[in-house]
C-alpha cells in the first residue's frame, strides 16, 4: 500500500467512527509506526481535512450547522452539572478555552456529546490525570457548543443562565 492509499484509508476510517481512534491503533492496522501516522494526519490536515486530536485519538470534525460560544464561570464541583446540562439538551461541547493574561488563548478539544463522556472527563479530573483549564482564570472559561438547531442553543443558554453558570 502506498502512502497516498494509506492516507485515503485512514481518512475513510476516521470519518466512519464516532469515537476517537488512537495513533497506535492506526499504526497497528496499517503496519507502520505511530510517527508515520502522525505524518499522515499532518498531510491530511494540509489538504484541508478537518481532523483533530483528542487525548484518546483522532476524530474527523464534520461541518456544524449551528454553534455558539458560551462564556461561563463556576466551581470545580459544578463542571459535571454544566456539561450534563449541555448534552442533555442536545448540545455537543466542542472545546474549552480560556484567555490567560500571560499565555494568551489556551484551548482544549473536548467533543463531549454524552453523559458517558462527561463521566470520563470527571473521572480524569478526580484521579488527578487532568486539571480543569478554568482554574487558570479563576473559573472563567468558554465552551464552543454545537447542535442541530438554533433552538437547542437557545435552550442551553437559558438553562445555563438559570443555573448561574453564564458569565455575562
Image: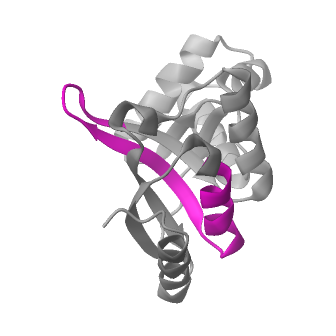
Which range is magenta? Answer: 79-106
- Residue drawn 66% across and 31% down? 125
Does residue 85 lie above or below 19 as drawn? below
Does the magenta run of residues contain 91? yes
Q: How is the image coloured?
A: one colour
Residue at point 67%, 51% (across, down): 80
Task: Give yes or no for residue 42 being in the magenta stretch.
Answer: no
Which quarter of the figure has residue 104? top left
Residue at position x 47%, y 74% in the image: 161
* Up-down relation of residue 55 to residue 149 (above or below): above
Image quarter hosting the C terminus:
bottom left
**Which of the 4 image quarters holds residue 31?**
top right
Up/down of 88 relative to 54, above or below: below
Foreground residue among 152 and 123: 123
Query: Could you tell me residue 9's position as x and y percent?
Result: 66, 40
Task: Indicate the position of residue 149 as horizontal and vertical percent values.
Answer: 53, 84
User: In terms of depth relative to the viewer, which is nearer, 55 or 79?
Assistant: 79
Q: Work out whether residue 149 can be spotted.
A: no
Q: Is residue 117 left or right of residue 33?
A: right
Q: Is residue 72 above or below residue 39?
A: below
Q: Is residue 70 left or right of residue 78?
A: left
The answer to whether 136 appears left or right of 93 in the picture is: left
Give me the residue at 78% from left, 19% from top.
Answer: 28
Amino acid at each position: 500500500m502506498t502512502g497516498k492509499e494509506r492516507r485515503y484509508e485512514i481518512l475513510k476510517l476516521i470519518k466512519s467512527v464516532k469515537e476517537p481512534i488512537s495513533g497506535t491503533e492506526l499504526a497497528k492496522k496499517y503496519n507502520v509506526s505511530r510517527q508515520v501516522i502522525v505524518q499522515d494526519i499532518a498531510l491530511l490536515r494540509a489538504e484541508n481535512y478537518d481532523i483533530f486530536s483528542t487525548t484518546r485519538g483522532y476524530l474527523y470534525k464534520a461541518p456544524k450547522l449551528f454553534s455558539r460560544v458560551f462564556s461561563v464561570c463556576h466551581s470545580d464541583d459544578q463542571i459535571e452539572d454544566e456539561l450534563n446540562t449541555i448534552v442533555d439538551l442536545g448540545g455537543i461541547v466542542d472545546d474549552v478555552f480560556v484567555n490567560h493574561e500571560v499565555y494568551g488563548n489556551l484551548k482544549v478539544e473536548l467533543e463531549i456529546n454524552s453523559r458517558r463522556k462527561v463521566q470520563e472527563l470527571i473521572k480524569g479530573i478526580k484521579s488527578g490525570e487532568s486539571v480543569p483549564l478554568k482554574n487558570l482564570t479563576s473559573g472563567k472559561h468558554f465552551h464552543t457548543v454545537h447542535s442541530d438547531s438554533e433552538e437547542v442553543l437557545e435552550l442551553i443558554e437559558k438553562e445555563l443562565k438559570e443555573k448561574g453558570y453564564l458569565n455575562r
